[in-house]
Image (cartoon, grey):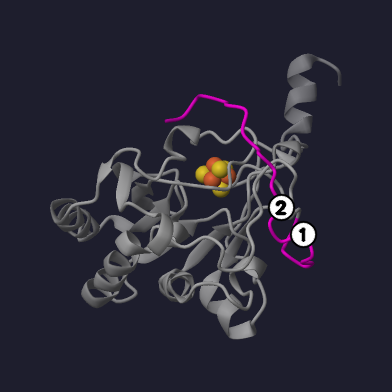
């Protein structure tokens, strides 16, 4: 699923008259939907491409990651193009759901992460799962979600209510398309600088995007903490 760099980016802008759709959007290297144009009900086949237990890459802490199938954004250079098809992978099953809940019950697991594909176009799978996680674990386990939608797009009039409901159950949202021209491998949890890691409860309560408070992107210029030691070892003193 990873490692391939296909040429994507059909670049259809279906909402060309709209403004204020979020950082770097519209992006000519992806499809840009109008409000409510795409929905899980019409597009999803309730398929998942992968489930990974106890990973440390998809958010904070040790997590369980569910990769749902299908994404119509078709960003240029998407690394998961093999699961753009909503029928990729295999059908989600109740057995897998029980396994996820069992894995989440481990004390060292911080939470679950929804990735894809496009999670907000697979709410038939993720809404019931997220509701069960809240019922069973309350807020002792957190829920992270990656999406190609921007926060602003999700707030548009006419967007489908299932997306908003899933958003209300999520703690941290990584939003926006992958924009190849803005790629930066030193960013934490995201591939391009237009994407944001958002604190969802704070963003909902303030009605505008609020960045998650524990970000620490890597920096290019790392100061030398031991200049004297180094100089002395190199014999320059
Ligand atoms: S939104 Fe994400 S999964 Fe979808 S095409 Fe863009 S990079 Fe790939």
Residue picked out by circle 2: 13
* Residue appearing at x 56%, y 63% in the figure: 37
For the residues marked 1 and 2, what is the alpha-carbon distance in whole angstroms?
6 Å
Closer-to-camera residue (100/23): 23
Residue 214 picture location, percent across and down: 57, 61
Tell me: residue 12, above or below residue 109.
above
Tell me: residue 82, above or below residue 63.
above
Residue 213 picture location, percent across and down: 60, 66
Magenta span: chief secondary structure: loop
* Residue appearing at x 75%, y 44% in the figure: 28
Residue picked out by circle 1: 16
Q: Are marks 1 and 2 in contact (CB under 8 Å)?
A: yes
The quadrant of the image that shows the N terminus is: top left
Name the outermost residue toward the right.
Answer: 237
User: In which of the image's four quarters is ligand 1 placed?
Assistant: top right
Q: Can residue 197 be seen in this view?
A: yes
Image label count: 2
Q: Is residue 189 visible?
A: no
The stretch of residues the image draws in magenta is: 1-23
Residue 47 left/right relative to 36: left
Label 1 environment density (alpha carbons within 10 Å; few <14, some 14–19, many ≥20): few
Residue 100 picture location, percent across and down: 22, 55
Closer-to-camera residue (128/73): 73
Q: Does the residue labelled 1 lie within 8 Å of ligand 1?
A: no
């Amino acid at each position: 699923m990873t490692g391939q760099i296909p040429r994507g980016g059909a670049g259809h802008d279906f909402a060309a008259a709209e403004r204020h759709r979020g950082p770097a959007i519209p992006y000519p290297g992806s499809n840009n939907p109008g409000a409510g144009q795409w929905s899980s009900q019409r597009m999803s086949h309730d398929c998942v491409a992968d489930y990974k237990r106890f990973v440390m890459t998809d958010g904070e802490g040790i997590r369980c990651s569910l990769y749902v199938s299908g994404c119509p954004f078709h960003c240029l250079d998407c690394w998961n193009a093999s699961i753009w098809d909503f029928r990729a992978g295999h059908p989600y099953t109740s057995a897998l759901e029980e396994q996820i809940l069992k894995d989440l019950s481990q004390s060292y697991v911080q939470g679950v992460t929804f990735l894809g594909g496009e999670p907000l176009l697979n709410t038939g799978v993720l809404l019931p799962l997220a509701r069960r996680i809240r019922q069973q674990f309350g807020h002792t386990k957190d829920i992270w979600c990656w999406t190609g939608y921007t926060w602003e797009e999700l707030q548009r009039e006419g967007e489908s209510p299932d997306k908003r409901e899933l958003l209300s159950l999520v703690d941290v949202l990584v939003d926006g398309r992958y924009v190849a021209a803005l790629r930066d491998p030193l960013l934490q949890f995201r591939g391009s600088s237009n994407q944001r890691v958002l604190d969802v409860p704070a963003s909902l309560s303030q009605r505008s995007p609020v960045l998650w408070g524990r970000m620490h992107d890597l920096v290019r210029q790392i100061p030398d903490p031991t200049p004297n030691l180094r100089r002395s070892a190199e014999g320059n003193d």
